[in-house]
Image: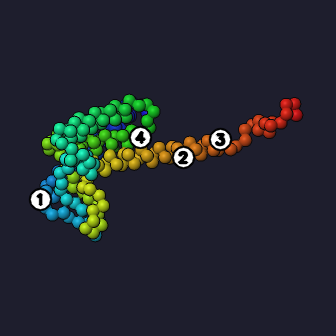
Amino acid sequence: MPLLRRLLLFFGVTVVSMAVDQATKQVATAALKGQPPRMYLGDVVRLLWAQNEGAFLSLGASLPDGARYWVLTIGVGVLLLSLTVYALASKALDGIQVASYALIASGGFSNWIDRARFDGSVVDFMQLGIGATPLTGVFNVADLAILGGIGVLFWHGWRAERRAKALAKSAGGAPGPDASSRGSPPGT
């Protein structure tokens, strides 16, 4: 994929994803902060405002402040920059892979912006559950972008592997032009 197309695709997906995440966080803060949770679809979907000091599903929230800063702000920032450079520099990636890496980076950068704005916290506002039992922690659109990007990368890799196996099977199973002479003694 040419560099200009990679740049346009990566930054287009990133800007749209981050804009949607930041907008939904602003709406959630205005509508849900200080309010009781709102339940939809028979309490399967819950909207509630929460501040998350950890990573996805509060991982790392119990770390001391200094460690959390180095891991979730500095470490994640370096990881996101590295991911961005890889996605933009690798000529081997196709459009689906570039868009997937853009989703992962955009979700990470959007949550990273929250950490900078809100003293190390991220705004979360969605939860899935059944009745009073939560099935997930509280999450946001950025988390969905990250999971979506990872999911598409796995799906794309799985499809490529299936295609390669099918191609190898069809190439190996079909007799070649000289198959009739294999196994025959020379000169027969």
Give the mark nearest the N terminus, 3 or 2: 2
Crowd rating for badge 2 (residues with CA inside 10 Å; few <14, some 14–19, many 20+) = few
Q: Is residue 122 above or below residue 184?
A: below
Residue 43 seen in render: no
Give the mark nearest the N terminus, 4 or 1: 1
The numbered mark at residue 171 is: 3
The numbered mark at residue 34 is: 1
- State yes or no: discs 1 and 2 in contact (Cβ < 8 Å): no
Q: Nearer the viewer, residue 99 or 113?
A: 113
Q: In the rendered image, which residue does mark 4 sit on? A: 97
Q: In the rendered image, which residue does mark 2 sit on? A: 162
Q: Amino acid at mark 4?
A: Gln
Measure how far apart labels 4 and 1 are at the Cα level.
Answer: 40 Å
Measure how far apart labels 1 and 2 are at the Cα level.
Answer: 50 Å
Give the mark nearest the N terminus, 3 or 4: 4
Query: Where does residue 21 sit, x and y in percent of width and height?
Result: 24, 48
Measure how far apart labels 4 and 2 are at the Cα level.
Answer: 17 Å
For the image, the number of numbered tags is 4
Residue 71 seen in render: yes
Which quadrant of the structure image shows residue 163? top right
Q: In the image, 111: left or right of 168?
A: left
Quarter of the N terminus within the rendering: top left
Quarter of the C terminus within the rendering: top right
Q: For the residue labelled by badge 4, is the local secondary structure a helix, a strand or a loop? A: helix
Q: Amino acid at mark 3?
A: Ala
Query: Where does residue 150 sit, x and y in percent of width and height?
Result: 38, 45
Task: Name the residue located 14 percent from the left edge and 42 percent from the top edge.
Answer: 119
